[in-house]
């Protein structure tokens, strides 16, 4: 039996993987019992040496891995990883992504400890990547406010038994108009008294004949289904479907919410202006989630630039971490051809999108300092 297992799906970027593994080895390897990575290699068929490079990184770090030559998306990847680790009868599971880096010692251990001491059943960050009506429903059912009812599938820590008790559809989902999105079951007291029952159904038109009603309650299961509105398709990103099912099983008081510390295109103003809200540079962060770095494969492997976003700072932010990961990766000579392609693809994006090299270099300096690189 293993108490603490971390699982991570990888898109196959060898440099992001090298950076992730480096933080793992230096910062939090001793805080877990087992770590397993699912490595998608479908985009690396022309670069078998890159697959070998990734395998070597993982093996030397003591990380188990699954090779997937045919692409497995995020949701099915999580299901495969959960099935793979079932052999050790795991108690607690942490889920991470390849562009999420833990740079504070004890951060992972602290999250798992909140589970093992039985203080909480879930330690996670909240997110609202779903249809607006689900966000509004979350407010009324669970008090989730505007942050949304679902959890990030990153820096998520919970009991293995709870994750596998869902329908295990961890991926993005759509629900057709009128389709049941999720169902909630609660044990409620139902009055035996005919008058009380009549009142509950007809808004109070009958009276009990006794001056003091002592009719006992009957506890029954009450099921409520929440369906997609008849005039719209409901959408949910990765882990929304799972999060809704988990919320119906777990008391909100047993969910510990922590900041995701997701990076932002406004990171420079966050760094210099020090706003009051939580951000990567608030002095409390022990991890960060870059976000959107899986888009590496398109412009590097096909040499097709992605659609330009309205804010150049968004691509500058991504390039910071692609460049940092590439520059700091060990033994790049082993994948010389791929490494050159990666480097020149980044240079091309900077040039053609007219991105600010000064801002990119400034960000690299700032993040390197924050992350202890």
Image (spheres, helix red, strand yellow):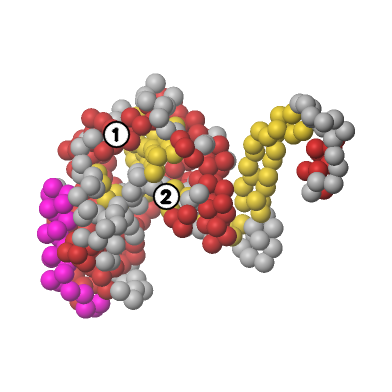
Quarter in which the N terminus is drawn: top left
364 within the magenta span: yes
What mark, if any, has residue 110 been given in the picture? Answer: 1
Report the residue marked by disc 2: 126
Identify which residue is drawn at 29% across, 49% down: 100
365 within the magenta span: yes
What mark, if any, has residue 24 been given in the picture? Answer: none
Q: CA distance from mark 1 to mark 2?
A: 18 Å
In the image, 249: left or right of 119?
Answer: right
Q: Residue furthest front?
A: 211
Identify which residue is drawn at 34% across, 40% down: 37
* Residue 311 falls in image quadrant: bottom left
Q: Main secondary structure of the magenta part?
A: helix
Identify which residue is drawn at 79% across, 29% down: 212
Q: Which residues are magenta?
A: 352-373
Q: Nearer the viewer, residue 320 or 210?
A: 210
**Residue 81, how many percent across, how many down?**
42, 38
Mark 1: give few (<14), some (14-19) or many (20+) Cα within 10 Å: few
**Residue 41, how many percent across, how many down?**
35, 50
Q: Nearer the viewer, residue 273 or 91?
A: 273
Q: How many marks?
A: 2
State whether residue 312 appears in this view: yes
């Amino acid at each position: 039996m293993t108490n603490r297992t971390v699982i991570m799906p990888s898109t196959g970027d060898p440099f992001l993987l090298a950076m992730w593994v480096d933080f793992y080895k230096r910062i939090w390897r001793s805080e877990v019992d087992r770590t397993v990575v699912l490595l998608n290699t479908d985009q690396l068929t022309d670069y078998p040496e890159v697959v070998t490079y990734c395998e070597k990184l993982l093996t030397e770090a003591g990380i188990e891995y699954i090779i997937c030559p045919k692409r497995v998306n995020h949701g099915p990847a999580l299901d495969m990883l959960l099935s793979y680790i079932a052999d050790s009868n795991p108690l607690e599971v942490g889920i991470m992504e390849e562009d999420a880096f833990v740079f504070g010692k004890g951060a992972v251990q602290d999250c798992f400890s909140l589970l093992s001491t039985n203080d909480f059943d879930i330690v996670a960050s909240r997110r609202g990547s779903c249809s607006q009506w689900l966000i509004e429903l979350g407010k009324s059912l669970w008090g989730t406010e505007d942050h949304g009812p679902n959890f990030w599938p990153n820096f998520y820590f919970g009991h293995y038994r709870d994750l596998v008790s869902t329908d295990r559809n961890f991926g993005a989902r759509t629900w057709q108009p009128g389709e049941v999105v999720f169902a909630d079951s609660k044990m409620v007291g139902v009055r035996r008294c005919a008058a009380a029952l009549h009142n509950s159904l007809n808004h109070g038109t009958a009276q009990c004949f006794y001056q003091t009603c002592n009719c006992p309650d009957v506890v029954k299961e009450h099921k409520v289904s929440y369906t997609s509105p008849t005039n719209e398709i409901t959408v949910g990103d990765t882990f929304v479907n799972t999060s809704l099912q988990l919320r119906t099983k777990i008391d909100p008081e047993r969910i510990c919410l922590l900041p995701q510390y997701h990076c932002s295109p406004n990171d420079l103003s966050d760094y210099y202006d020090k706003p009051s809200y939580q951000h990567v540079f608030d002095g409390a962060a022990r991890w960060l989630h870059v976000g959107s770095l899986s888009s590496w494969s398109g412009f590097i492997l096909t040499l097709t630039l992605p659609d330009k976003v309205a804010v150049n700072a968004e691509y500058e932010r991504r390039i910071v971490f692609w460049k940092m990961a590439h520059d700091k990766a060990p033994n790049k000579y082993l994948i010389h051809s791929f490494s050159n392609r990666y480097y020149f693809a980044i240079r091309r994006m900077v040039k053609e999108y007219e991105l600010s090299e000064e801002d990119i270099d400034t960000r690299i300096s700032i993040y390197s300092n924050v992350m202890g690189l």
